[in-house]
Image (spheres, helix red, strand yellow):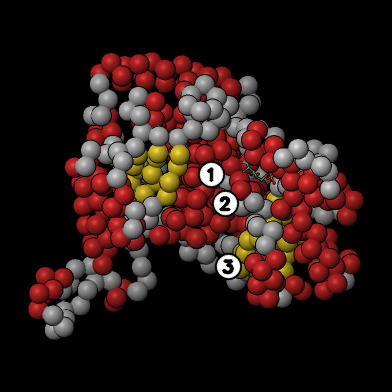
Amino acid sequence: MSQPLTFEFTHLLNQFSDVQLHTLFKKREVVKQTIKQKRQAGDLGFLDLPYQKNISDLKKNAQKIKNSCETLLVIGIGGSSLGAKAAIEALETRSKTQVLFLENPNPVTLERTLQKINLKKTAINVISKSGATLETLSLFFIVFEKLRKAVPEKQLKEKIWITTELTKNPLYKIAQEYSFPVLPIPHTVPGRYSVLSSVGLFPLLVAGLDVEELLAGAAFIDQNSRDTYLYGTLAYGTHQLLKKPLTVFFPYDERLSLLGDWFCQLWAESLAKSESSGPTPLKAIGAMDQHSLLQLFLQGPRDKWYTLLAIDTYESSLESSLAIPQTKLLKEFSYLANIPLEKVLQAEQKITEKSLIQFENPVCRITLPSVSTYSLGALFYHFELAAAVAGYLYEINPFDQPAVEQGKILTHKLLKGENLDF
Ligand code: PA5
């Protein structure tokens, strides 16, 4: 199997003293054992997703939608939508069925989305692990009533797909009552670690993506996890020992912008569980943010460390437009003639990396051979495992989100008309 990602840690490692590294690596060994034991006990199901067996069923079901629908409307939020959205933004989708997402209970966005689609030719995939998320249920109830008016009652069963945990949750109850097909989310796969489960795979199959390739990339990292353990350990170390509370995810490719949002959610919800355990994640996109955030990064406070994502090959089907042509427009720029456009972006990435280092910011680099399904699967798995490693080093639970749950409960109460004490 070819390597989906290459890691460069030299500069980051050099920031730590030998004693610090010794301490970090000793702790890492303990965490390795913890993860191994928990995995063997079946508690970390998301780590086994690259080897799941139900792919052919998911494929068959996705094919039904591809055969009959112009649109798949995914209703979900947070871990139930960000991963698939990120993959669809990053990769070239080849399906005639478009996949759209409804996340926020915003009437304007809902109206705009509904205006874009023909409900008669639309399938709905409602995704919620808890089956009780207010945003998701509110949107679903509205869309369901509209769909009911648009298609005969008996067709509803073929148009609504519920992705949830098989527990007595509200969404699962609805699915049972109306006989909507259910795509299960395993109990041991937390929301933001679920992109490689039915949560992400089903929309991605409808979008025409090769999910086996995605899982192969993830399996590669599972079987070659040394660098991922090192990344998780150094992420913890830069925060706790080098005192860098902010971590910047910095791909040199705007196709990975939503992956940045996915990363920020994973990092924030997984690792922030106390005053001392919350590294703040940030996203920047090269080269655009060289004209925005980079000034802050270079001359602002030295409170951040950086993960640059470099791309070896930017594949494009527009061969003729790839290189900068000879131009008589301005002689001073003649040195640009015949330079492939990707070399401009790659030069910018190199210079940014060097400048960050020059201004004494800790940096590591992950290189993708190209933005492919295989490399994306590897990135998903890499950051999920690294979040678990960092979480155990902080000695917190990286899989829960008590503060978010508290907000969900209070919003339900407020909408029920209950009197809240603030
Ligand atoms: O990672 C998480 O657990 C959260 O971000 C959830 O994915 C998000 O709150 C949505 O929850 P649910 O899938 O239960 O609707």
* Lower sequence index among marks 2 and 1: 2
Residue holding disc 2 = 82
Considering only vertical position in the picture, is 266 above or below 81? Answer: above
Residue holding disc 3 = 95
State the separation of the CA atoms marked 2 and 3. Answer: 20 Å
Q: In percent of the image, x 31 and y 19: which residue is there?
A: 20
In which quadrant is the N terminus drawn? top left
Q: In percent of the image, x 50 and y 50: which residue is there?
A: 261
**Front label number (2 vs 3):** 2
Q: In the image, residue 83 lies at what x, y percent?
A: 55, 50
Q: In the image, residue 52 lies at what x, y percent?
A: 61, 40
| 303 and 258: which is toward the camera | 303
Q: In percent of the image, x 24 and y 57: which residue is there?
A: 348
Q: Quadrant of residue 289?
A: bottom left
Tag 2 and tag 3, C-beta contact below 8 Å: no
> Residue furthest toward the front?
422
| 126 and 69: which is toward the camera | 126
Ligand 1 closer than 8 Å to label 1 CB:
yes
* Lower sequence index among marks 2 and 3: 2
Residue holding disc 1 = 265
